[in-house]
Amino acid sequence: VASRSTVAPRSSRPPHRPARHARVRRARPVVPVVVPRAGLEDTSDASVRSPAEEGEPTVTGPFPVDLSKLTADERAWLDARDELRVLVLGKTGVGKSSLVNAIANANSAIGRLEVGTTQVQRVENSITHGDQSHDVCLFDTPGFFDVEGRTPAGVLRELGGKVDDYHAIVYAHVATDRRLRLEDEQSVSFIVRALGAVCVSRVVVALTFANEINPGPTQHDGDRDGVRERDDRNQNQNQKKESASPRAGIDPATADVLAARGAQATGLFADAAERVSGLRGGAVEGAVWVPCGSAAADDDGDGRFRGWEGDLWRAVIRRAKAAADAAGAGDAPTDGSYDFDPTAIELDVDWDGLAAAGISLQGAPPARPPPPLELVRAYVSLALGEYVSVTAVTDEKSAPKERSAFAVKQRGMPSGFAATVVLEVYGPLDPERRVNGATTNAIYMLMPGTSADTVMKVRMGSVEDDELPSPAALRRGGAEVTVGGLSVNGSGPVTLRYDRNDGSFVSDTERVSGTGIVEIDPETGDAVVMARKSPGECAKEPG
């Protein structure tokens, strides 16, 4: 199909990195494609989508938006963004995927995904105004509390695996619901507690199915739900909508209903932010709301709601820009000196805070006790350094024994590898004195032991003498080494026991403490006491 592009799955795309300078691209000509525009219907009961299709929505060309209604500052802020990133959240059945399809010319269908697959859809496109184009990315999510039991925790877990940061949140809420339900308050409370009260300043509430409102004598009944009593402040001027006056063609009764629904939904966010942050009144600004109707043309009688897509995009841009200004981020620098967008906010779910608040974490990442890495760090802080013997096992004419330990990196180690790798050098470190096999070495990987209060040293091999980094590089730390071969001598890992009495680590052959290292011959019981060299002694050596 002409002008149809496929968006690559998230896993195959590079991590998000904003542009190094502001840019406004020229929109490429798009051959018009006649495609049916989806209405805001619930897609949860549609046919199952295959895993091959999952994560691969298509778009049918850029989406035109009248950006002239934005201020010059708002347009400049948008120009400076490499990509406007928006999360789309809400309960199941509220029309999130249809909303995304309507404002992005896409065919995302998250409601039809198989349970157990990666559920978050990344929909990329651009919004255009004249000859200008701006990249946008919408993250369509499965609904909270759907028939398959997806919880808010499970949805945010999936979202956290795909999203680094975001500029705004669109929260879909059904405009025809006369009463707020328990799931409404649970969903909003979870979002605010998980992402922090600061996220409220980036929320735009999309009142879906606004075109289906039929104001009548019972339409206002139940606008106060039985779950919670909201005081009159949720109807005041702090609850904003995108336009100060109703859209042309909307009768006053419908406008009143929309205002009541908008006040209800935005009030949920204001109340949740107040509970989380303890701030009242205008200290935490409530979310704005936009009525969203059918995306179809006039043939369904919904012409009064045409143009809501542009209203929603402008509200998102204004909201994101205002939140960035309030956070002090300002505009992105244009000198190419940064590697992240300072106006975006990190998607960092506060799982501990949610647990402390007593909120269900069903579907969240499984809780795993942290490994005792503190012991590994404590051992490293004692063992690293250069040592020289102060006693000898033979006669007094023997040269002092030398030993060194340095934190290094093994070449080829996978990115993000967390284990500590240590190079131990036995003998002189100075290359001029490493002759006739006077110096040997070994590479060890350190990890928590299998029993309490222990650390394991697993021998990985050794480094060829002529490939040892220079003493200066070793002393700086983090030098890269190549292991010549894995240890195959049959010896198991060395286990060091932590002595809580003096803070030392003890094995069958050595004791490592803050004062130095004592090497013990297991057969004779003879000991060599090695003291840490002073920085001055280390500096005297060449290299």
Image (tube, rainbow, N blue to C red):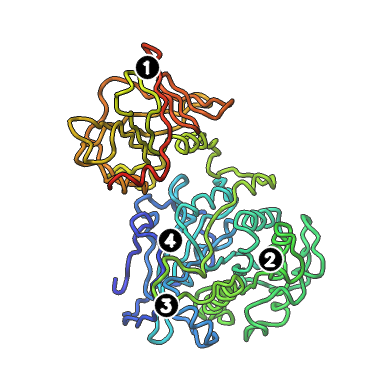
Q: Residues within 10 Å of mark 2 (few under 14, many from 20)?
A: many
Q: State left or right for residue 185 relative to residue 541.
A: right
Q: Say the numbered circle drawn on residue 101.
A: none
User: Which x, y percent locates residue 363?
Assistant: 55, 44
Residue 515 falls left or right of residue 442: right
SS label for mark 3: loop
Q: Looking at this view, is 532 or 250 the one in front? A: 532
Dividing the image into 4 quarters, which one contains the N terminus?
Answer: bottom left
Q: Residue furthest left?
A: 436
Distance from the alpha carbon under mark 2 to that under mark 3 = 38 Å
- Look at 74% across and 60% down and name the residue there: 278
Comparing labels 3 and 4, the label whose residue is closer to the camera: 3
Mark 1 or mark 3, whichever is nearer to me: 1
Q: CA distance from mark 1 to mark 3?
A: 64 Å
Residue 301 is at least partly visible in this image: no
Q: Which residue is mark 4?
A: 122
How far separated are the C-alphas under marks 3 and 4?
A: 27 Å
Amino acid marked by disc 4: Arg
Q: Which residue is mark 2?
A: 265
Left or right of 483? Residue 532 is right
Q: Residue 334 bears which disc, if any?
A: 3
